[in-house]
Structures are given as C-alpha cells and as structure tokens.
Image (spheres, coloured by chain):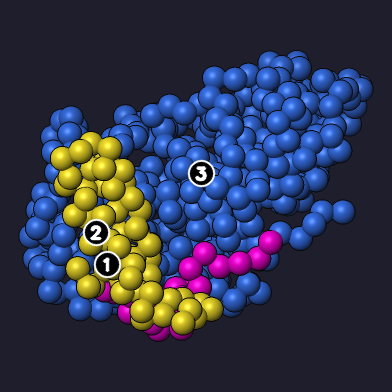
Chain colours: A blue, B yellow
Amino acid sequence: MKADLPHGYWNPKIELMPRDELRQLQLKRLNEVIQYAWRHCRFYHDLMRKHGITPDAIATLKDFFKKFPMTRREDLDKDQSENPPYGTRLTLPAENTLRYHATSGTTGKPPVKAFDTERDWIWGADAWASSLYNFGLRPEDVVMVAFGYGSFIGFWGAHYAFEKIGCRVHATGGMDTKTRIRMILEMGITVLCCTPSYALRILHVAKQEGIDLARESRINKIVVAGEPGASIPATRALIENGLNAYLGDFMGTTETAGLMAFTCSRLGPGLHINEDRFLAEVVDPQTLRPVGYSEQGMMVVTPLIKEAMPLLRYATNDIVILDPGNTCPCGRVFDLFRGGILGRYDDMVKVRGVQLTPQMVEDIVRSFPEVEEFFTTVEEKDGLDSLLIKFELRKDSISQFGQELSRKIKEQFKSKIGLTPEVEVAEWNSLPRFELKAKRFKDQRPKRH
Amino acid sequence: MRKKDGLSKQDEKRLLSAYKILEEFSEHDLPVVRFNCRKAKTELWQALFELDLTDAF
C-alpha cells in the first residue's frame, strides 16, 4: 500500500489568491514584459512596430489576446537563420548570459538556440521547484535524474530544483540502464526522474535481470517530462504499476526555460498551470480564436518574465483542454490542462480520412503488457494509405502469442479509431529505444498529405 | 507576527533589507564575498518576485 503524497503549498499567497487578483498580477507582469521587450528586444520591437502596437496599447489581457501577434516556431527559425548565429531576440550580449540550451532537434528542424540570464535560470529552476514541492517532493527524497545532461534543456532545471528543495540528487548522465538500476537499489533512490519512454525501458531491463522494482526498490514517486506518455492512460498505468509509485507529469519547453504545468499531490484530473509565471491561452488552431473551458485547442504561452530572450504569445502546437482550477480538490486557483498534453497538431496525420496522433496509437498498443516496444509507419500502397504497426513481444512472452496479440491490436484499432492497420511482430530488440523524446511514428507518404 | 499563508509586513521589510545588503555586497572587491552574495541576491530576488514584493525596488 503506497503512503499518500505529502500535501502543501510552495507559495500559498499566490496559489490560493482569488482568481481576479491572479489575473491582475498576470496583467502587471505582462505589462512589464512587454515594456522590457519593446525597449530591449529587437525581434519584438520590430514585430510590434509592424503591427502598429506600442506597449500602452495593451491595457488589459483581452487587448493582448486580441491585438498582439503570435510567435510561431517558424518565426524563431527564420529569425535565427536570417540573423545568425542567435537571431534578434537576445536582449543583451551573449557573454552576459549564464546558460545556453537548444531544442532537442527531434522535429528535424535546426535547433532553436535559447539563452538565460542568471535571473532567468533561477526563475526557471524555481518554477520546477515549486511544481515538484507541490507534487510531494521533500528534502528527505533521494533522486535519480536519468538523462544525458547535454545541450537539450531536458531535466537540467529539475536537477537544480531538487537541490533547492534539499533532496540528494544522483546525476546519471552517460550511465547505461543496468548501472542505473543497480544504483536505484544500492543508493535507496525514492524518486526516478526521466521521460516516460525511459521509465518503461528501465522496467523492461530490470525484468530481464530478474529484478522487480515495485518490490525491491524504494521508489515511491516518478517525475516525468519531455513526452506526452504520462497523459496516455495505458502508458501511465504500466509505469505506475511497474514501480508501485505515484507518477507526476511535468510540462515545459526549451524556449520558455521554465516549468509550465504540473501534477499536484492530490493527483487531480490534469496539470495545474503555473499561472503566476505563465500566461496560457487555448485557441482554435485554424481560426486562432480562443476556445472555452472543456474545448480542445492549441496552447499559446507567454512567460511572465524573461530577461535574455523574451517570448510573447508563443504558439506551441501542443493539443490541450483547459479546465478551471476548482476541478481539482487541492484548492489551488491555477487552471488545469485536462489529462496533460494530449499530443501535437504537427504530429496529427490523416489516414484514410481519420485524424490520428501517435498518442492514440500508443494508448492502444501499451494496453497490452506483453508489448515491449513498437513502431508505427504510415505509407502509401497502390494509392491508398496504409498504417503498419510493428511490435516486439517482451522477452519472457511466448512467441506463439504474437499472432493472437496482432489480432487483438487490430480489433482495438477498428473499434476505437475506425482504422484497421497491418500489425507485425518484430524480432526482439530490433526496434529503436529512446532516452529522450521518443519518436515511434513515421509518415512516409509523399508530401502532398 | 507571521501569517499562515504569507509574511507579515515586518518580515517583508526585513527581507527587502536583506536584499539591499546582498546587493551591496554583490559589488564587493573580495571574490568570495562578491560571488556568493550575487548568487544569494538573485535567489532572494526570486522569492520577492514570487511574493509580488519587487515593486519596492
């Protein structure tokens, strides 16, 4: 039986303040950010002039949502390529910044370069620290951060946040999975911090080694970020049951450098948005008009402080549904993203007329615990879309079970999504494994789609 | 007097005073003083910002 997560508020003054006061605080911080960008950031100064906006034109949050143009990833790419090496968002000489990070590059585009001042970095780590504390992290926790510590921002902010709370942190960059598993057991790790894909990888390798981490380790909390896995019920259940631990989902981006949304210790139905630090909007991806609570749309975000590289109305392409804060019993006024990040609009494909995301595939395939790894491909065969799912059985599964499982996966696809894929069993350990930003979906059709 | 969900006015003033002191020592000639106070000052600024107390600067 798992003990309940400790409940508390990092900053009750803000987290419990009346909602209209929170909106006033956001407006005050937004005005400061816009003024700063107007004075110091060429990218936004030029953009505002182009749209005939001066800072005093934004008197309300509604003004901002209505008048201020969105920034898209393409705008950042274009600015960076036309103004090498850093683009025109950098507000101060690069030598006056403290940190450099780049986006992961999994989209295939050149990575976006992101700088932080010392103030930005401490702000970002504080956003992580408050979110981790609100999930239930305490100084007595012993944490393993399982990622490569490269230029991708990944869990860098989390590392500093764990230290700020007072946890002992084991950095494991460069270690292989077996070594990490040994360390989990030997060092009494209570919190595993990694991507959902890597948590599954650890579970599979432990199983091969005859280790039951749910029984033999002290892990009671799992902190995941970087992929939408925790919002996929089947994946979430596999990780939580495999480790007999609470799973907290955390969401941020390299471009914002701070942690935007988190699972609280009451394990409510979504991720609370750090609304004192970020102004979040949800818009229709086609019309760019705001959508209401409970409606699906694209997340647009503005960090409410950013010294080195301001970012205003950043269109993330993430698919979210907004719920009011009181949907969760924790008492916070911060709104929630229902179920976390539900996918990305730029990952969504149309297959035989059906809108499909990698998360929809994963939710079905991971509901079969015999599956160790899988990969999805969309191809064109004889002028028709063809969806192919290859999966590996767990090493301890009986190989004859593969055909039966293929049939069950097909049935699930037909009933839940309305598509019948081809399903093949792949040789064990033949499909790619991931530590960061798993990509298990490839659309190989000609570009007209 | 401390409040359960925040700070008393007196504590707010003391924190702001601490910030002013750290700010002053962040310019000190002695590296051990300068660098440690600068880091501490920025960490304290974060707390003041989160508590919405930076208007006083």
Task: Point out which mark residue B17 bears.
Answer: 1
Q: CA distance from mark 2 to mark 1?
A: 6 Å
Q: As rendered, which of A104 and A345 lies closer to the eye?
A: A104
Q: As rendered, which of A153 and A59 lies closer to the eye?
A: A153
Mark 1 nearby-residue class (10 Å; few <14, some 14–19, many ≥20) = few
Would residue A440 be counted in the magenta stretch?
no
Q: Are marks 2 and 1 in contact (CB under 8 Å)?
A: yes
Mark 3 or 1, closer to the camera: 1
Picture coordinates of residue A341 (x, y %)?
54, 53
Q: Is residue A346 above or below residue B47?
A: above
Picture coordinates of residue A54 (x, y %)?
10, 68
Q: Report in which chain the residue with disc 3 lies.
A: A
Q: Are marks 3 and 1 in contact (CB under 8 Å)?
A: no
Task: Point out which mark residue B21 bears.
Answer: 2
Amino acid at circle 2: Ile
Q: Quadrant of the N terminus of chain A?
A: bottom right
Secondary structure under the numbered disc 3 in the rendered image: helix
Q: Report in which chain the residue with disc 1 lies.
A: B
Q: CA distance from mark 3 to mark 1?
A: 26 Å
Start-end of magenta stretch:
A6-30
Q: Which residue is mark 3?
A: A163
Q: Quadrant of the C terminus of chain A?
A: top left
Q: Which residue is at 70% across, 42% downward?
A: A190
Residue B55 in view, yes or no:
yes
Toward which corner of the image does residue A64 lie, by quadrant? bottom left
Mark 2 nearby-residue class (10 Å; few <14, some 14–19, many ≥20) = few
* Principal secondary structure, stretch drawn in magenta: helix
Q: Which residue is at 53% across, 24% downward?
A: A173
Q: Report in which chain the residue with disc 2 lies.
A: B
Amino acid at circle 1: Ser
Secondary structure under the numbered disc 2 in the rendered image: helix
